[in-house]
Each structure stands twice: as structure tokens, then as C-alpha cells.
Image: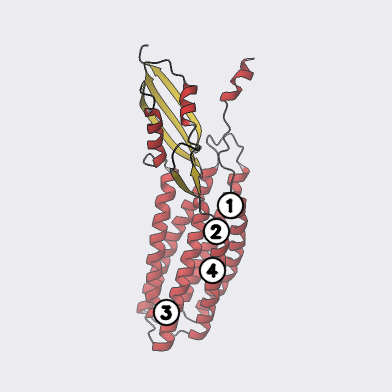
Amino acid sequence: MIHTSAHRWQHSHVFDQGNPVAERRTRWAVWLTATMMVAEIVGGWWYNSMALLADGWHMSSHALALGLSVLAYAAARRYADDRRFAFGTWKIEILGGYSSAIMLLGVAGLMLFQSVERLFSPTEIHYNQAISIAVVGLLVNLACAWLLRGDHGHHHAHHAGEGTAHHHHHDLNLRSAYLHVIADAATSVLAIIALLGGKLWGAAWLDPLMGIVGAALVAMWAKGLLRETGRVLLDAEMDIPVVEEIREALRQTPTVQITDLHVWRVGAGKYACIVSLATSSSITADQIRQQLSIHDELVHVTVEINNLHT
């Protein structure tokens, strides 16, 4: 009898349903990127184009990073019901995005080193062949970007009548894959500009210069992704709007005082919450949970009530 009556307080720990469409599209992007990677590295080495070679090595890191994103999706799905993961497996995907961002920084460093080296030690470039390969590389990147465009965020609204606030949430693993492809497309454009400049005006220095510009661009994107995924992994999100919304909802009950509050993300647009309250009334934890139920994004709420009269 006790077991039956306690059932309604038990929680599911599968807070995120995954993103099978994104996983499938990312697999296609891996194959496209890997194929073009080989063509650009071989072509850049054969035709002495630093911009093309840098783009090829850059693309190789993207092929690896995209593969990492696929593995993250697969691992999150495989261990979704594993009770060892106290708050689900969604952060495996975030860890994949964080790892991809670190790889992007490494690529930026490699591009910078090789470009500076080629700036001071120029070699003859076979422009026509290098331009052809760079254009094909750009087309492949655009195709991958189209595959990964997805819905990088979805909107959430509270229950009707509870305001119009919306929250925008991202699949950070998909976003990391998308950023890799966009960064590669940008370096392809820079490579084409550099090669055309060298062919038409003899400005061979444009080739390594564009490699340096591309490295700076990639590093900037990687930094932003590291910051965003790092915040999620470290639960450094007590400044997000939902925290203030929780406080505002509890202020509607003047007899309770918040003594402790913890909020962290457990899925795409899904949060867990632990709140400790002091009160002189007979309000129950169930009543507090009911107050907070207007926020659909709160999927795991733990309430502690401390009576001031005891």
C-alpha cells in the first residue's frame, strides 16, 4: 500500500528525447566532409596552395568533430535509461560540443602557424587547379550547412494566461557541428579570394594572409562555443531568466521565504530545480510544486519546507 501511494512522487530521469533527425543529417555531413577533406589536402600539397592546404586540414578537423557529434548523439541515446546518470544523458551531447570547440581552437592554431610560415617562405602556386578544388570544397560545405541547418532552437511558452515570455533553446551539439561547417565554408571563401588575387594580380602574399584571417575567425567562433557549452557543463546558469521566474512565482505566496535555490539544465530547454523555503504557514511541498507547474521547462522539482515555529 505504501509503495502504491508513493508512486506519484517518483520521477523519470529521461528529460531529453534526443534529436534523431539531427543525428542522421550529421552522419551525412561526416561522409561529405571526409571526402572533400582528402581532395583539398592532396590538392593543396600538390599545387602548393597554403590557403587550400589550410582549408583541407581545417576540414579534416571538422570531419573528426562531426564524427564526435554523431558519437555523442549515439552515446546519449544508448545510455538514456542508465540509472548511473542522475539527471539523464543530455550533457553527453554538450560534452561533444565542448570537445569540438577545443578542436576548433587547435585547428586555428595550426592554420596560423602554417600561414605565418608560408608568408615568410612563399612557394609557387598552381592557381587554376587550386581554385577549382576550393570551389568544389565550398559547394560541399554549403551542402553540409544545408543538412545541418535544422532548427537550432525551439521556443517555449508558459501555460495560457501566464504571460508571454519565451525561451530560446539550442541543440548545442548540432550547433557545434554547424559552426564547424560554417567555419570551413568561410575559410573556403577566403582561400578562393586569395587564389584569385594571386592569379589576377600576382599578390601571392594574399594566400597566407587569408590563412591568418581564417585562423582568427575560427578561433573567435570556437571561443563563443566554449563559453556557451562550458556554462552548461559547469551549471553556471543561475543568471538565466527561468531563475527569476521561479522567484517571482514564489513571491505570490507571501508566507514563504526562499532560503536556498538551485537551477540547472538537464535537457534542451529543460531544467531541474531544488528550492528550500522557510514558512510560518502550513503550506506543503505539493502546493509549491503546483505553483511552479506553470513553467513547463521545470521537469524535476525538489522542495524542502522548513517551519519557522519548530
Q: Position of residue 203 (x, y in %)?
A: 37, 85
Q: What is the CA distance from the residue labelled 1 to the residue labelled 3? A: 35 Å
**Residue found at x 36% / y 77%:** 119
- Describe the element under mark 2 as helix, strand or loop: helix
Crowd band around label 1 with a 10 angstrom C-alpha radius: few (<14), some (14–19), many (20+): some
Q: What is the CA distance from the residue labelled 2 to the residue labelled 4? A: 15 Å
Amino acid bearing label 1: Leu
| Quarter location, residue 278 | top left
Q: Nearer the viewer, mark 4 or mark 3?
A: 4
The answer to whether marks 4 and 3 mark residues whose Cβ atoms lie closer than 8 Å is no
- 2 or 4: tag closer to the N-terminus: 2
User: Which quarter of the rendering shows the N terminus?
Assistant: top right
Q: Is residue 24 left or right of residue 250?
A: right
**Residue found at x 39% / y 83%:** 204
Give the farthest residue toward the front. Answer: 161
Q: What is the CA distance from the residue labelled 1 to the residue labelled 4? A: 23 Å
- Describe the element under mark 3 as helix, strand or loop: helix
Camera sees residue 254: yes
State the residue position of label 1.
71
- 1 or 3: tag closer to the N-terminus: 1
- 2 or 3: tag closer to the N-terminus: 2
Q: What is the CA distance from the residue labelled 2 to the residue labelled 3? A: 27 Å
State the residue position of label 2.
66
State the residue position of label 4.
142
Please say if 68 is above or below 256.
below
**Residue found at x 48% / y 74%:** 53
